Image: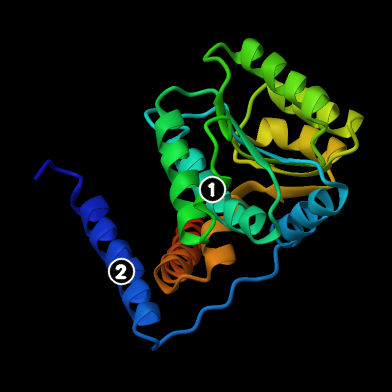
Amino acid sequence: MIEGTHFVFGAFIILGSIIIGVLLATRNGKLHPKIRRIPALDSIEEAVGRATEMGRPVHYSPGYGDITTSTAPQTFASFDVLNHVVALTARYNTQLIVTCKSPQSFPIIQELVREAYLVAGKPDMFREDTVRFISEAQFAWAAGVLGIFTREQVAANIMLGYFMAESLLFAEGGAQVGAIQVAGTGNLAQTAFFVAACDYTLIGEELYAGGAYLSQDASKVGNLAGQDIVKMITIAFIVLGTLLAT
């Protein structure tokens, strides 16, 4: 082992064991962690319901990110929420439009949506134009999405994932067609635009909690709880170390 890495390795093993332990305990029913209420995620059903009442489609965007770069965690977190949105649109017989920028994500999203409709007992609701690859170029993709807003007159606009300069374009475009908007990104530089222009916004790590919150899957909830415990332990060590150093 490289000299000076013993502490880091030991901390990794201990903290990793805590996460796994909490996950297993939750899965086995020994622990019952509670996730606080997240209004932005609760509002998704309201958004889909409004689109149903108006007879207009729901738009979903997993953002600028893809599955092969540092943006992948936000993209996969968005996939978890997308699965929930597909189930809601299947329940209410509401048209769903998913726009995609990443060619790597496109086939995954297609299969995710197709499978979700199949599980919901509505395989016929999946059409070839349900998931639409627009462009890999940032602003060509943004222009294509804005065109869909206008032509399709979407009533709900859900944007969750990694977003960059297109965030305000999408938010203002959705507002212009009167869509109820739910947004969230781990890119804090863009969060302010979502807060200003959208009806509901996920702040920071709330995006990563989406899958666990909506599904209440024991493994996901346990993993989330374990990470929170590790964060608290880490903060406690930072504070203790600071006090000892001074």
The residue tagged with tag 2: helix, strand or loop? helix
Q: Residue at x 24, y 54 (%)?
A: 7
Give percent across and percent down for residue 24: 32, 76
Side of 53 where 74 appears, left or right: left
136 vs 166, left or right, is left
Quick one: which residue is furthest to the front in this view? Answer: 124
Give 43 or 227, whichever is nearer the viewer: 43
Q: Which image quadrant: the N terminus? A: top left
Q: Quadrant of residue 63?
A: top right
Q: Are marks 2 and 1 in contact (CB under 8 Å)?
A: no
At label 1, the amino acid type is Asp
> For residue 16, what is the image quadrant?
bottom left
Task: Say above or below: 8 vs 223.
Answer: above
Q: Position of residue 104 (x, y in %)?
A: 40, 26
* Label number found at residue 124: 1
Tell me which amino acid carries mark 2.
Answer: Ile
Q: Most extreme residue toward the bottom, as rendered? A: 30
Element class at badge 1: helix
Residue pictured at 89% horizontal, 31% vertical: 177
Q: Position of residue 10 (x, y in %)?
A: 22, 59
Determine whether 207 is above or below 222 in the image: above
Q: Is residue 68 left or right of residue 190?
A: left
| Picture layout, residue 36 above or below residue 227 | below
Asked if 167 appears above or below 118 in the picture, the reply is: above
Label 2 vs 1, first from the N-terminus? 2
Q: How many marks?
A: 2
Q: Is residue 209 visible?
A: no
Q: Circle 2 sits on which residue? A: 20
Is there any visible trace of residue 137 in the rendered image? yes
Dot 2: within a 10 Å radius of its alpha carbon, few (fewer than 14), some, or many (20 or more) residues?
A: some
Seen at 31% across and 75% down, the residue is 21
Percent across and percent down for residue 122 are 54, 55
